[in-house]
């Protein structure tokens, strides 16, 4: 049965009333120009704890952000209840552009990268000199992730009362990485915290390391007012520690001198996301020598121009060796 004639126009069409009274949908999103600025301190099951001025505010991500996730260290814009009172919840409506990103994948074959920390200035790589034994491959991978993400590395060696640091210092000496050596006694009396704090002044520093190296113990010494659960014992059979930090957490140093971000202990550090061409930027003495390299040069092949660059005396051969060792970690699994 024909409801309308052959020659109908829009005036003949009856529009059904909107029973729910909802406003029509639109693609125009609010700009939230009056949103408050904040920093993400930790993330727990979809709830984000943020610092807004001097208040700690619990928030959730707005639906309009889609799958874009905020991580610890992100600068965000928030609306809603920003009082920070119990049972209140704000909304994160915007994630500001990031200055740096620490990323990793589950392994080198995993194409899905995970952002661990955003906007950190420095990556403190914590390793024990013994109990458990140092894992240079993991350190190399953390260094590559730092160089790739725009973070400056800092090497923190713990438990020097059990073993000397000479071998590790020789291995990484050519990279000119700042370092701090600590012992258990120095952690107890506060000397170690004071020396590490000198490297953190005015900066946002993410701490990373595998389980059992004393990372969280060191963070507790740096920020005694916000102690986290101490690390578990090292397994005598596997030589590995037990995870006790389960989520990243940003903690302020005293007198607004900087921030410390404690991250969960890692047992692997995948580098599937890393573009090897970006790692060379951390070697300013070698980077000019790449101008003569063939296209898509891996910097470890017969035609690489860096060999001649070093032979002409423009850089130390140990620097080239260190670069190639770091780039090779992209092709090796940690622990091989």
Image (spheres, rainbow, N blue to C red):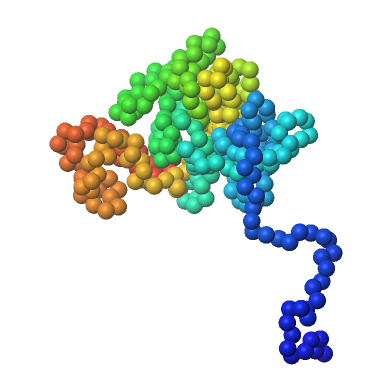
Residue at 41% x, 30% y: name it.
153
Residue 111, given in percent of the width and then of the height, sits at 49, 52
Query: In the shown orientation, is residue 284 left or right of residue 14?
Result: left
Residue at 64% x, 33% y: name it.
50
Residue at 23% x, 48% y: name it.
293
Confirm whether residue 16 shows in the render. Answer: yes
Residue 215, given in percent of the width and then of the height, sits at 53, 25
> How many numbered marks appear?
0
Residue 17, given in percent of the width and then of the height, sits at 83, 68
Query: In the shown orientation, is residue 123 left or right of residue 297?
Result: right
Picture quarter with the C terminus: top left
Residue 25, given in percent of the width and then of the height, sits at 71, 60
Would you place residue 24 above or below residue 262 in this image? Answer: below
Who is closer to the viewer here, 241 or 281? 281
Would you place residue 125 above or below residue 275 in this image? Answer: above
Picture quarter with the N terminus: bottom right
Q: Residue farthest to the right? A: 19
Confirm whether residue 47 shows in the render. Answer: no
Query: In the shown orientation, is residue 322 left or right of residue 34?
Result: left
Who is closer to the viewer here, 265 or 312? 312
Q: Residue farthest to the front? A: 11
Who is closer to the viewer here, 62 or 260? 62
Q: Residue farthest to the top? A: 189
Who is closer to the viewer here, 118 or 213? 118
Would you place residue 61 above or below residue 86 in this image? Answer: below
Residue at 34% x, 46% y: name it.
277
């Amino acid at each position: 049965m024909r409801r309308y004639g052959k020659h109908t126009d829009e005036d003949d069409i009856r529009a059904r009333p909107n029973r729910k009274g909802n406003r029509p949908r639109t693609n125009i999103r609010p700009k939230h120009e009056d949103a408050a600025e904040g920093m993400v301190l930790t993330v727990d099951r979809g709830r984000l704890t943020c610092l807004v001025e001097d208040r700690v505010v619990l928030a959730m991500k707005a639906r309009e952000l889609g799958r874009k996730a905020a991580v610890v260290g992100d600068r965000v814009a928030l609306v809603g209840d920003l009082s920070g009172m119990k049972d209140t919840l704000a909304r994160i409506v915007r994630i500001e552009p990031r200055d740096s990103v620490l990323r990793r994948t589950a392994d080198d074959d995993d194409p899905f990268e995970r952002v661990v920390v955003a906007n950190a200035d420095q990556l403190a790589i914590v390793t024990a000199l013994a109990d458990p034994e140092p894992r240079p491959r993991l350190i190399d991978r953390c260094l590559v992730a730092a160089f790739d993400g725009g973070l400056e590395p800092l090497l923190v060696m713990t438990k020097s009362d059990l073993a000397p640091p000479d071998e590790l210092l020789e291995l990484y000496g050519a990279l000119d990485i700042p370092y701090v050596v600590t012992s258990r006694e120095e952690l107890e009396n506060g000397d170690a915290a004071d020396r590490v704090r000198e490297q953190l002044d005015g900066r946002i520093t993410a701490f990373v390391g595998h389980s059992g190296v004393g990372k969280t113990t060191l963070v507790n010494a740096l920020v005694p007012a916000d102690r986290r659960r101490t690390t578990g014992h090292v397994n005598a059979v596997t030589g590995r520690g037990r995870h006790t930090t389960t989520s990243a957490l940003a903690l302020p140093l005293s007198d607004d001198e900087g921030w410390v971000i404690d991250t969960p202990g890692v047992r692997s550090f995948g580098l599937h996301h890393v573009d090897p061409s970006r790692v060379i930027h951390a070697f300013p003495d070698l980077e000019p020598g790449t101008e003569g390299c063939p296209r898509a040069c891996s910097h470890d092949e017969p035609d690489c121009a860096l060999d001649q660059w070093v032979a002409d005396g423009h850089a130390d051969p140990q620097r080239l060796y260190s670069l190639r060792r770091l780039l090779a970690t992209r092709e090796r699994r940690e622990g091989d």
